[in-house]
Image: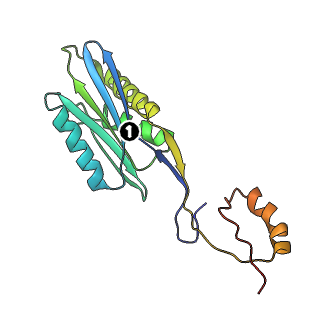
Amino acid sequence: MPDSQGLKPYQTILSAGESEIVISKSRFLGFCVPVLSEAQAQEALSQIRKRHFDARHCCYAFRLTGGIVRSSDDGEPSGTAGAPILSVLSGANVENVLCAVVRYFGGVLLGTGGLVRAYGKAASDALEHAKIVQVRVCARIAVTVSYSAYQLIEPMIRKRGIPLRRILPRLPR
């Protein structure tokens, strides 16, 4: 449920995850990376491409909060790489995540179904190796109440899962 500023909780990844699978001599390397903007996603993608400059394809998808979604088949037949990668991210309901899959071609054509399965599996495995976390938008507030009032509201606060950080006793004046 969105808060008063329109911000809502979402899932993302805490750290990067990687995977490697080999299918019919083709090697698929999956990379899931946390990003906060389209520019960060493009920069992370650029770094992956630079490391794997000799790969045949570097297909990707990313989802950002605010509804920004991009994907690319990078020369693979249309809908066989970017869409399955994006489907993995959407299915896991994660945002602010780039997932790229690098393919080193092994000489055997996999067909469209084989490509969809391979790219989806590499993306899914990489996401599985990244730690998915829930992000909640929070604000820290300070409230001054009497001790008797605190005893009444404290159970309600805890029941809602709101963390209580520090209680400072108010000294009489």
Q: Relative to 162, does residue 168 appear above or below in the rendering?
A: below
Left or right position of 158 against 53: right
Mark 1, Cα crowd under 10 Å, few <14 / some 14-19 / many 20+, is some
**Residue identifier under label 1:** 16
Q: x, y percentage for residue 98?
A: 35, 43
| Residue displayed at 44% across by 49% down | 95
Q: Position of residue 140 (x, y in %)?
A: 59, 68
Coloring scheme of the render?
A: rainbow
Count of all numbered marks drawn on residues in the image: 1
Extreme residue in the left direction: 54
Q: Position of residue 167 (x, y in %)?
A: 70, 67
Q: Residue at x 76, y 77 (%)?
A: 145
Q: Is residue 33 above or below residue 120?
A: below
Q: Is residue 41 left or right of residue 150?
A: left
Q: Relative to residue 157, is residue 104 drawn left or right? A: left
Identify the residue shown where x is 80% and y is 77%: 146
In the displayed structure, 118 sits above or below 3; it is: above
Task: Return the residue nearer the eye: 24 or 163.
Answer: 163
In front here: 135 or 21?
135
Q: Amino acid at mark 1?
A: Ala
Residue 28, image quadrant: top left
